[in-house]
Amino acid sequence: MNSFQRILNSLLSREQPVAPTTTPLEFTTLSGGVMPENYLALAKQRRTIYALGKDLPLPEDDVVQTIQDAIKQAPSAFNSQSSRALILLGNEHNKFWELVREQLRKIVPAESFHATSDKLDGFAAAAGSVLFFEDQGVVTALQEQFAAYADNFPIWSEHSSGIAQYAVWLALAEKGIGANLQHYNPLVDEDVQRTWNVPASWKLRGHMNFGSIQAPAGDKTFIEDEKRFIVAK
Ligand SMILES: Cc1cc2nc3c(=O)[nH]c(=O)nc-3n(C[C@H](O)[C@H](O)[C@H](O)COP(=O)(O)O)c2cc1C
């Protein structure tokens, strides 16, 4: 009997579908929280967390791997994989926020810079940043290869970036790591490119601060479903 027949026989010999005898397991995360038991629980757990610290609940290398895996598994138009990321930890993360601070110093009025600077201190208090880019070389190549869709590729590239950002946000949330999404681009683009030798074709689309959760997110409000959804059946 080959393995296919064995599996078939074992399925056919069951009189009833086997019902689960246990309730879903609850896992404790490294940060001590309860791991969400399904996708929607995880989606609810992902929030904008501004109060972040440097005590990551798992080793930096594991966090980097999580971020990379989340981006790799994210879908992209024509599987073009246009998303790129620069992952900064420790002093490199602090350096990023100093670059932002110096750019803002040039444009924010001196009398209000103190408040701006305090806000940046809050971001720098996180453990790391993921800078999300889209490789414009990939977009241009697709436009040339598939001229009929030329107008769509830049749009789909933006979609891909959004999906990659959300994927990372969720993956970090699942590990008990908090995050917030920021946009000091394009102000800081040239500094980033120069400092970390980022290819010129990489366009910065946003950057995510991540770290230990020092305080929970605030309440979140929702508009009425009637304004958002049309269901036809
Ligand atoms: C495309 C996009 C851009 C955002 N830009 C910023 C930003 O620049 N600064 C910021 O503090 N939050 C930013 N956010 C976070 C939103 O303010 C936040 O997701 C929203 O208020 C809902 O809260 P939640 O993330 O806790 O669910 C952004 C979110 C998205 C999806």
Image (spheres, rainbow, N blue to C red):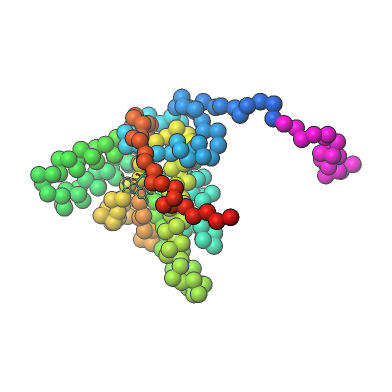
Query: Is residue 16 highlighted in magenta?
Result: yes
* Whether residue 62 is visible: no
Which residue shows up at 28% across the image and 50% down it? 184
The answer to which of 7 and 145 lies nearer the viewer is 7
* Residue 118 picture quarter: top left
Labels in figure, total? 0
Q: Residue furthest bottom?
A: 147
Query: Is residue 36 highlighted in magenta?
Result: no
Q: Residue furthest right?
A: 1
Vertical relation: 200 (above or below) 114 = below
With 215 as the anchor, is 162 left or right in this view?
right
Which residue shows up at 54% across the image and 49% down it? 73
Which image quarter holds the N terminus? top right
What percent of the width, then of the height, locates residue 174? 48, 36
Which image quarter holds the C terminus? bottom right
What percent of the width, then of the height, locates residue 219? 35, 35
Vertical relation: 2 (above or below) 54 = below
The answer to which of 56 and 50 lies nearer the viewer is 50
The answer to which of 96 and 40 lies nearer the viewer is 40
Q: Residue furthest left?
A: 111
User: Which span is picked out in magenta?
Assistant: 1-19
* Residue 6 picture quarter: top right
What percent of the width, then of the height, locates residue 226? 44, 50
Which residue shows up at 39% across the image and 55% down it? 133
